[in-house]
Amino acid sequence: MINAQRIFRSLLPIDLRNIRRDPLLRWVVLAPWLFALLLRVGLPWLTAQLQTHTQFDLRPYHPLILSNFFMLAPSISGMIVGFLLLDERDEGTLTSYAVSPLALRGYLLYRLFLPTFLGFVTTLLSYPLLQAPPIPCFVVIAISAVSALTAPYLALFLAAFASDKVAGLALTKLNNAILMLPVVAYFLPSRIQDFVGMIPVYWPMKAYWQATQGAAWLPYLPLGIFCYAVVIALLLHRFLKRPLP
């Protein structure tokens, strides 16, 4: 049986040391808070400027803009862990974990749980900075919990397909383009929108759009969990099939 306390005690100090050594990783940890403050200050200013100079009302699109916030913290924590996985793969650390008392199963459990938890907590703590449309707290918690699954998805996406950090950065850009498709779907007729549902992040974003309009939001979250589970399982299978260096 996997001892969770032993896993965290063994691996967490190593990860914290790696993050402290990497300036890029240190900065991206702050990104969700900076983005929340930027939206809090910049979105009202941009809305007022567009209204004054172009007569364009941006307010109906605030839910679309704010829904992207739920993806930010999980994406960043997933990217950090994805890069750590690439480093450990290149250094041969994965082989060591596979034959250690932790075993590869315990290592992956830790690797996938930690970014999910951090993405969830960071989203909840930074969400009040947005001054977003008022929706019940339990709705924010539910949407944040499903959105947090973006973290293991992105971590495994990088680990399954990238050969090194340079390729990981390129794949991150590709993934960001894929994650923009739900934004495009927002402008499509409602009967067509759900065809974008093969992209897991669409469902928590859709739930947020619905919640801000006072419409039914709950049915979209189980669909999101199902899509995330399928994609994560496929990526995990691909990762485990890759030969270790």
Image (cartoon, rainbow, N blue to C red):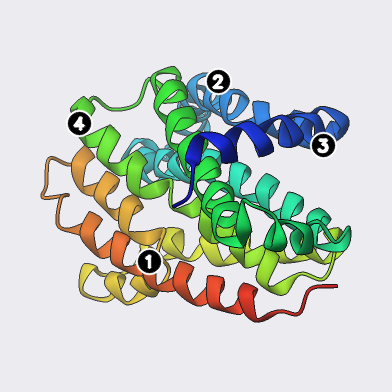
Q: Earlier in the sequence, mark 3 or mark 1?
A: 3
Image point 66% across, 71% down: which residue?
160
Q: In the rendered structure, are the residues bearing label 3 and label 4 in contact, judged by CB atoms less than 8 Å apart?
A: no
Packing grade of label 2 (10 A; few <14, some 14-19, many >=20) is some
| Residue ID for mark 2 | 37
Circle nearer the viewer, 2 or 1: 1
Where is residue 100 drawn, in percent x and y? Answer: 70, 55
| Residue ID for mark 4 | 138
Image point 18% across, 27% down: which residue?
136
Circle nearer the viewer, 2 or 4: 4
Cα distance, mark 1 to mark 4?
22 Å
Q: Earlier in the sequence, mark 1 or mark 4?
A: 4
Q: Earlier in the sequence, mark 2 or mark 1?
A: 2
The amino acid marked with disc number 4 is Phe
Q: Secondary structure beneath disc 2?
A: helix
Where is residue 140 drawn, in percent x and y? Answer: 28, 33
In the image, 176 versus 100, the foreground residue is 100
Circle nearer the viewer, 1 or 4: 1
Q: Earlier in the sequence, mark 3 or mark 2?
A: 3
Residue 15 falls in image quadrant = top right
Circle nearer the viewer, 3 or 2: 3
Q: In the rendered structure, are the residues bearing label 2 and label 1 in contact, judged by CB atoms less than 8 Å apart?
A: no
Cα distance, mark 3 to mark 4?
33 Å
Q: Earlier in the sequence, mark 3 or mark 4?
A: 3
Q: In the rendered structure, are the residues bearing label 1 and label 4 in contact, judged by CB atoms less than 8 Å apart?
A: no
The amino acid marked with disc number 2 is Leu
| Residue 24, numbered label | 3
In the image, 93 versus 176, the foreground residue is 93
| Residue ID for mark 1 | 229
Q: Secondary structure beneath disc 4?
A: helix
Image point 58% across, 58% down: which residue?
154
The amino acid marked with disc number 3 is Leu
